[in-house]
Amino acid sequence: MIIPFLIMDDHVPTFDEIRNGGFELAIRLSLEKKYDEAKNVLTEVLKVASNDPEIMAMMAEIFISENKLSEAKAWLDKILAQVPNYPRAFYDLGFIYQGKKQWNKSITAYKRAIRNYPNDSKEEKANAYQNLGSALWEERRREEALEAWKTCLKYNPKQKHAKHNLKKFTNEYGLPRSPVGSAMDDVQAFIHMKMEEINDLENPAELDVIIKKIMNTWNDKIASKYARKLDKMNVNEKVRLFKETKVL
């Protein structure tokens, strides 16, 4: 394949001209969804920049765009074999595992991307935290998911997906919204408040006993007396009621 920008009269293109020109051309072709042409350009560039992780990552991302995840992963594995802490490769791996619903692998990959991105790569860190939050939510680690989305917005306050997810998945108590409805949000908020009141839990085996006591208190002192009133109470009224209710 002849790369158009390399055709120059009386001029031998430099390494940077080949590498950077090819990279920019591949991006443009990829945006136009001309994936085969983009991959051909990158293949030519890799003949002179064979170990360039950014070029290989671009190749992997084109395969991801084509939903050819096995081919994409092969390129990412090749990158990490040469540059073990390359953050973009971990980010792309997280995306691949997320697409396969392999949530734990996705979480691990995004965390490694975050750990290895430089501190000044704020947008990249933000995107990794956003996707990490989504994987954590699917893995039912919902409080961690909310924290990941909040951290995302610290790096990029304009990250629209994190803003949307926080609004959608946070209940009126500032806790993860229950997938079964607002009534369970009340129960979970009561449990959360009572657990925070306990500071001397030395034996983890006591946890089941304590949870049982909290639920018995909920049933006897809240549900039986206020079931119909809770829906009409605002969040401050409910919080005050929950805090004033002593565990049996």
Image (cartoon, rainbow, N blue to C red):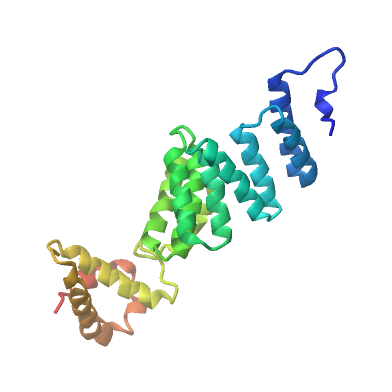
Q: Is residue 13 left or right of residue 174?
A: right
78 or 126: nearer the viewer: 78
Q: Residue at point 25% right, 84% down?
A: 219
Query: Does residue 9 appear in the picture of this structure?
Result: yes
Q: Residue at point 49% right, 35% down?
A: 121
Q: Is residue 243 left or right of residue 178?
A: left
Residue 213 lies, with reference to residue 6, above or below; the image says below
Residue 61 lies, with reference to residue 195, above or below; the image says above
Looking at the rendered image, the quarter that the C terminus falls into is: bottom left
Residue found farthest to the top: 10
Residue 89 occupies quadrant: top right
Q: Position of residue 109 (x, y in %)?
A: 48, 50
39 or 65: nearer the viewer: 39
36 or 182: nearer the viewer: 36
Residue 214 occupies quadrant: bottom left
Q: Residue at point 47% right, 64% down?
A: 138
Query: Does residue 34 appear in the picture of this structure?
Result: no
Q: Position of residue 1 (x, y in %)?
A: 84, 34
The count of marks equals 0
Q: Position of residue 72 (x, y in %)?
A: 64, 49
Residue 135 lies, with reference to residue 244, above or below; the image says above
Residue found farthest to the bottom: 224
Residue 97 occupies quadrant: bottom right
Q: Position of residue 56 (x, y in %)?
A: 64, 38
Residue found farthest to the right: 9
